[in-house]
């Protein structure tokens, strides 16, 4: 059996046929150019600029013959809304232009409510009872993002972060169950759930079935195993596992199914890489429902007045290594999936389909958070992993609870997915900057840091204080007692900076 | 245009009348006395009379020195540091620019460093005690039962290096008693005292960042032995202006004249 | 934590009675002179009398036990939380130095000597204190603590030599816990989490008010003299009720917010750094103002430094609050008691930038070796950055005031030429 080079080429090119991907890459160019000295930047633009424009135009005209179709592919709820609403809101500075821009999010919010109203119009007159939101995911995502952008104008950093996190928790854990295009979609879902609870098939899990080619994956842990798969189609580690599931022999023989899967997974991964470049570990700090749940537990610790544990540096490194080893072992197991026997065994061992998910607290927490203990996954492989009884993995759940109550964001120090995004903390578009001249080294930044990072406090020479572990939660920026000492930059533009104004201090009580 | 500079020091009051074209018209030094204001008033009147000028003909009266705030005849007040720098530059105009000015007065010692274009770069003064000032030498002269001039002459005669550690007027007395008891010559003790003071001033110059060329003004510069010791310590030639005690008053007159010119220029600009 | 004795009780001396009418007379004269200086100031806030009385210790309530303390490294919040009234002990009276010399050696800083004299002077606030708290910030304080132990129960806060290391943070928190135990013994009340949180919030409010004052003064330095500012700040640690102080301070703010100078005269803006200027020793402040410079910012521990930065509340557990106090009062401290001078240099350079100052003046108190020793680096670093700098080395006495005036005026003249 030989691999067909043509097939491989087409698989590799496939991700780039996604116009969204093209847009993201084009969007990354200025950030990349900024890192080069002036003369080189022009040279790079001259060399790569025209081909990229030609490439984009080629896609526009040849691959997607009509503009309408091209735009519909752009209709990816998260990335689209991000580009149109969030990105400009982040980069346009205070002033008249910002006010002009705010018309756009206000329009989206209005249309969001119109869409809800129209969704409920589809409920037949004879059907009564309570239904969740009946609104297309695109409108929900853009509506929520627009709402947050508007709210941001009236909130300080602390409350804005809380709002975003609560919203993301709701949408990512419960969204999948709640949101349906219209009444008939909702009915179908209810019927399906009545028949079987198997969420393992890709198409069944998500409300975004209407966009079969655009799998949405966030660099955070909205688990696909939660009720109806949550709002997104799982995390990136799941994607990696899917990549490993592909039987290379099928691929070599030109199996269409294998090719399609590979192409789709690669496309999703590419988007993930682009997303990580743009947002680094921001998703960890603000989106990830797992960390939000963890922070609720952490809040309980605070209320009890228990001090947080600050693991020393070697322990932190140990956490990282164990997180990565978990990935290594479980991914090797995933590689065996295509070769499983009839009884689901490989070399005498029973192998779960998604081995990493068996040790990931996301799978333990998200379904329970979404639908109570009933939802606790009776999933393939469960009985193997910690395999004594159905609730065997409650041990993992317990560990999760305890760990979050002992120390802030303990899991985030293991999380391999976060580590992957963390690669872009330096060199990505976000950069945490410090003006050493303003810094008293009081150590508040290190004290409030949920990841126990000391770089922000100790770095006095280099203005860029981003570090691999940073989840961009911006607590240091929020708490810093020196105005303009710490600031977050995106592509060189200041998004937010630390303030300690007299008004803020005197109006606390 | 005629400007007047008055330097009301702690022991003497000096006054210089400066004409822009003709240079110094008159200069005088008197003891300050108990009421600096009156002394300055009288000096002002008598000196003007001596060159038959009336107060109306004077464009500006600039005062400086410790009593600068105590007199009311002045139009412009400045510190002696600024005046001193201006005066020295006026006196030593021809040669290459002065970079460091040493001013040894009765109660204080100042070191002023200048930039290449004559701006004050930095300066330092002795702390509140009289160590390292002219007063120290006067006290030692008394102790050696010599007049001040004889004391200086003795010092110039000596060629033996005698190390004196104290520059404090009070403690030096006992040190001198010790030295004399050991049988040291008066001349050597006098030279040692000058050396100690010069060493102290030289270290002050180094701390202030002084560099060649040096000018030496104030009452201390009339002391030949001190001048010699200073030159030894600095390993450079030290220039002493023609009338080193009046240089501050002269500087005040120079700065005053500049101020008048500047004011006139801005008035004519504003008018035109 | 147990309240263990820190000193060897066997060698305790009996309190020394000091009766020196000459010194007393002169100390009253010093106070009177300083008061005259203040009275000569123009546009003072209407309610400044409140702060003047407070600084002289006339607004103290007798209800709560008074706890005298030294230095910024002692958090007044802890004393308040324990139910005590914090009174800052530093004294700047030139005449009292003589009394101090009877017990402390001649070459010890005048602040320690004058402060000791206050303790034995029956009319001062210090003598009414029920206990003393001192950090081991410098040699003078360390030994002064041992002497004060003869008079009242005294607690020494052990300070780490180095900042910014978890090890030292833990040490400081332990010291604060011991302080809590000590204060509990004095006031008979345990420091509760709630009381501590309340005190910290109050401190933050005070920081906010001081920040606002500085904001206004930065825009228009003539609105409030730096002497009045110091008076207000030092009044806050003279045993007054914090809420009352905040109220009066707010009144001042509303009053000076509307201030507009009749005619704008050019005055230099300077940053003052160095040793503390404590009432009634406002000599460096008044001298600067008289010579035509406005002190727009300072790093003096008796000035804005003591309450400009807030304690940052992150977690509200008892230990977390103690950690927060340690970060604010020990880790961020620019005091030369710690090994690195970087914080003060950084702070000074930043203040020059932030308050657009023309120059930096270093007040180096004679016999305070720590500040003296730091002067060289400070002057060199500022020279590198081309920030004009002058060192004002003096002590409490007024004899060198004319010399200093010449120096200051000449320094300000050189600024004009640039």
Image (cartoon, helix red, strand yellow):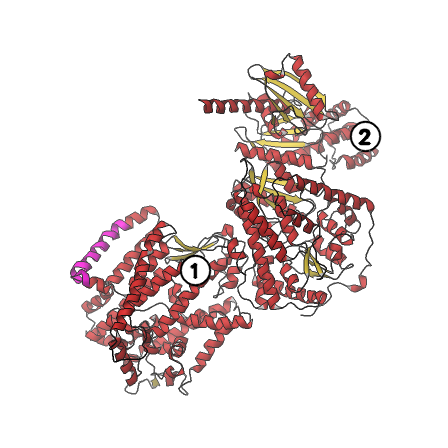
Q: Are marks 2 and 1 in contact (CB under 8 Å)?
A: no
Vertical arrangement, residue C30 with respect to residue B111, above or below: below
Rate crowding at label 2 as few (under 14), some (14 to 19) or many (20 or more) other CA atoms within 10 Å: some
Location of residue B40 (image quadrant): top right
Q: Is residue B96 magenta?
A: no
Disc number placed over residue B143 in the picture, else none: 2
3D distance between C-alphas at marks 2 and 1: 81 Å
**In the displayed structure image, the side of residue C263 where residue C407 appears, left or right:** right
Identity of the residue drawn at 32% across and 61% down: A82
Of B227 and A410, which appears nearest the observer?
A: A410
Label 1: chain letter: A
Q: Is residue A414 visible?
A: no
Q: Secondary structure at mark 2?
A: helix
In depth, the one of C365 and C210 nearer the eye is C210
Residue bearing the label numbered 1: A155
In the displayed structure image, the side of residue C141 where residue A183 appears, left or right: left
**The residue stretch that appears in magenta:** A45-68
The answer to whether tags 2 and 1 share a subunit is no
Q: Is residue C413 above or below residue A393?
A: above
Which percent across, then down, holds residue A182?
A: 26, 73
Instruction: Give the prevailing secondary structure in the magenta stretch.
Output: helix
Horizontal side, residue A33 vs residue B145: left or right = left
């Amino acid at each position: 059996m030989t691999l067909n080079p043509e097939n491989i080429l087409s698989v590799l090119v496939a991700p780039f046929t996604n116009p969204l991907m093209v847009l993201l890459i084009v969007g990354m160019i200025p950030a990349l150019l900024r890192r080069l000295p002036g003369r080189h930047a022009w040279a790079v633009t001259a060399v790569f600029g025209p081909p990229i424009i030609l490439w984009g135009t080629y896609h526009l005209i040849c691959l997607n013959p009509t503009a309408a179709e091209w735009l519909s592919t752009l209709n990816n709820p998260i990335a689209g809304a991000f580009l149109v609403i969030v990105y400009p809101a982040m980069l346009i500075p205070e002033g008249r232009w910002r006010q002009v821009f705010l018309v756009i999010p206000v329009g989206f919010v209005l249309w969001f409510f119109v869409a809800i109203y129209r969704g409920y119009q589809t409920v037949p007159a004879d059907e009564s009872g309570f239904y969740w939101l009946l609104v297309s995911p695109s409108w929900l995502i853009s509506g929520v993002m627009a709402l947050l952008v508007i709210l941001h104008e009236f909130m300080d950093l602390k409350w804005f972060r809380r709002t975003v996190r609560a919203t993301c928790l709701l949408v990512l854990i419960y969204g999948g169950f709640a949101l349906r295009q219209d009444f008939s979609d909702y009915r179908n879902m209810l019927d399906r759930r009545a028949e079987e609870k198997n969420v393992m098939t890709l198409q069944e899990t998500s409300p975004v079935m209407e966009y079969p080619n655009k799998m949405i994956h966030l660099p955070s842990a909205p688990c696909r195993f939660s009720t109806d798969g949550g709002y997104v189609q799982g995390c990136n580690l799941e994607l990696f596992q899917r990549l490993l599931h592909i039987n290379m022999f099928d691929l070599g023989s030109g199996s269409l199914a294998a090719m399609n899967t590979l192409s789709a997974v690669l496309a999703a991964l590419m988007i993930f890489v682009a997303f990580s470049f743009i947002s680094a570990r921001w998703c960890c700090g603000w989106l990830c429902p797992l960390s939000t749940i963890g922070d609720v537990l952490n809040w309980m610790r605070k209320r009890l007045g228990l001090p947080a544990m600050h693991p020393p540096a070697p322990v932190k490194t140990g956490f990282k290594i164990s997180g990565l080893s978990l990935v290594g072992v479980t991914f090797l197991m995933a590689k065996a999936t295509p070769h499983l026997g009839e009884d689901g065994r490989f070399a005498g061992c029973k192998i779960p389909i998604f081995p990493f998910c068996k040790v990931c607290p996301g799978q333990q927490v998200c379904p329970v958070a979404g639908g109570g203990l009933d939802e606790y996954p009776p999933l393939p492989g469960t009985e193997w992993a910690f395999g004594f009884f159905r609730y065997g993995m409650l041990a993992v759940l317990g560990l999760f609870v305890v760990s979050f109550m002992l120390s802030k964001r303990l899991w985030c120090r293991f999380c391999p997915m976060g580590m992957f995004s963390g690669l872009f903390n330096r060199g990505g578009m976000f950069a945490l900057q410090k003006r050493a001249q303003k810094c008293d080294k009081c150590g508040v930044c290190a004290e409030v840091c949920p990841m126990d990072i000391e770089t922000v406090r100790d770095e006095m020479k280099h203005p860029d204080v981003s570090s691999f572990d940073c989840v961009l939660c911006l607590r240091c920026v929020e708490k810093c007692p020196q105005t303009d000492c710490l600031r977050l930059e995106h592509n060189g533009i200041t998004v937010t900076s630390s303030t300690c104004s007299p008004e803020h201090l005197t109006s606390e009580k | 245009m005629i400007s007047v500079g008055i330097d009301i020091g702690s022991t003497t009051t000096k006054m210089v009348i400066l004409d822009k074209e003709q240079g110094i018209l008159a200069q005088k030094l008197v003891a300050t006395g108990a009421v600096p204001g009156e002394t300055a008033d009288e000096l002002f009147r008598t000196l003007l009379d001596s060159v038959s000028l009336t107060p109306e003909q004077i464009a500006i009266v600039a005062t400086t020195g410790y009593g600068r705030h105590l007199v009311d005849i002045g139009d412009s007040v400045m510190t002696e540091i600024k005046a001193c720098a201006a005066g020295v530059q006026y006196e030593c105009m021809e040669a290459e620019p002065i970079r460091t000015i040493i001013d040894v007065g009765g109660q204080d010692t100042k070191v002023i460093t200048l930039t290449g274009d004559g701006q004050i770069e930095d300066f330092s003064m002795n702390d509140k005690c009289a160590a390292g000032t002219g007063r120290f030498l006067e006290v030692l002269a008394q102790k050696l039962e010599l007049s001040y001039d004889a004391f200086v002459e003795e010092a110039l005669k000596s060629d033996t290096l005698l190390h004196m550690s104290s520059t404090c007027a009070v403690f030096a007395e006992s040190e001198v008693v010790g030295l004399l008891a050991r049988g040291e010559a008066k001349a050597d003790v006098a030279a040692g005292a000058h050396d100690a003071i010069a060493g102290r001033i030289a270290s002050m110059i180094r701390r202030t960042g002084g560099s060649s060329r040096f000018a030496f003004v104030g009452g201390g510069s009339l002391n030949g032995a001190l001048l010699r010791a200073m030159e030894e310590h600095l390993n450079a030639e030290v220039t002493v202006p023609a009338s080193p005690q009046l240089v501050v008053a002269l500087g005040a007159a120079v700065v005053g004249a500049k101020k008048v010119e500047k004011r006139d220029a801005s008035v004519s600009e504003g008018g035109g | 934590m147990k309240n263990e004795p820190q000193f060897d009780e066997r060698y305790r001396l009996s309190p020394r009675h000091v009766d020196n009418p000459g010194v007393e007379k002169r100390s009253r004269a010093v106070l009177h002179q300083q008061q005259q200086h203040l009275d000569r100031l123009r546009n003072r806030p209407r309610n400044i009398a409140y702060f003047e009385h407070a600084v002289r210790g006339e607004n103290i309530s007798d209800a709560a036990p008074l706890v005298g303390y030294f230095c910024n490294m002692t958090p007044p919040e802890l004393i308040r939380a324990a139910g005590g009234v914090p009174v800052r002990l530093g004294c700047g009276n030139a005449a009292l130095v003589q009394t101090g010399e009877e017990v402390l050696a001649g070459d010890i800083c005048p602040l320690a000597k004058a402060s000791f004299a206050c303790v034995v002077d029956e009319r001062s606030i210090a003598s009414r204190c029920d206990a003393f708290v001192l950090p081991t910030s410098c040699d003078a304080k360390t030994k002064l603590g041992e002497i004060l132990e003869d008079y009242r129960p005294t607690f020494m806060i052990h300070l780490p030599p180095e900042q910014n290391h978890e090890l030292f943070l833990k040490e400081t928190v332990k010291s604060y816990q011991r302080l809590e135990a000590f204060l509990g013994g004095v006031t008979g009340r345990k420091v509760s989490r709630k009381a501590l949180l309340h005190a910290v919030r109050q401190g933050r409010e005070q920081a906010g008010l001081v920040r606002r004052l500085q904001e206004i003064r930065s825009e228009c330095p003539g609105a409030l003299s730096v002497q009045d500012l110091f008076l207000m700040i030092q009044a806050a640690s003279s045993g007054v009720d914090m809420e009352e102080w905040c109220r009066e301070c707010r009144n001042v703010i509303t009053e000076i917010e509307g201030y507009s100078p009749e005619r704008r005269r050019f005055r230099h803006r300077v940053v003052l750094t160095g040793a503390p200027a404590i009432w009634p020793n406002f000599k460096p402040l008044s001298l600067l103002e008289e010579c035509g410079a406005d002190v727009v910012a300072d790093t003096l521990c008796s000035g804005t430094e003591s309450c400009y930065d807030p304690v940052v509340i992150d977690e509200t557990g008892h230990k977390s609050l103690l950690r927060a106090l340690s970060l604010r009062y020990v880790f961020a401290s620019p005091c030369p008691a710690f090994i690195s001078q970087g914080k003060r240099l950084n702070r000074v350079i930043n203040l020059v930038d932030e308050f657009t100052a023309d120059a930096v003046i270093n007040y180096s108190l004679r016999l305070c070796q720590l500040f003296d020793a730091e002067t060289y680096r400070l002057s060199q670093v500022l020279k590198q950055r081309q920030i004009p700098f002058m060192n004002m080395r003096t002590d409490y006495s007024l004899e060198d005031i004319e010399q200093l005036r010449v120096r200051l005026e000449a320094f300000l003249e050189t600024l004009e030429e640039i």
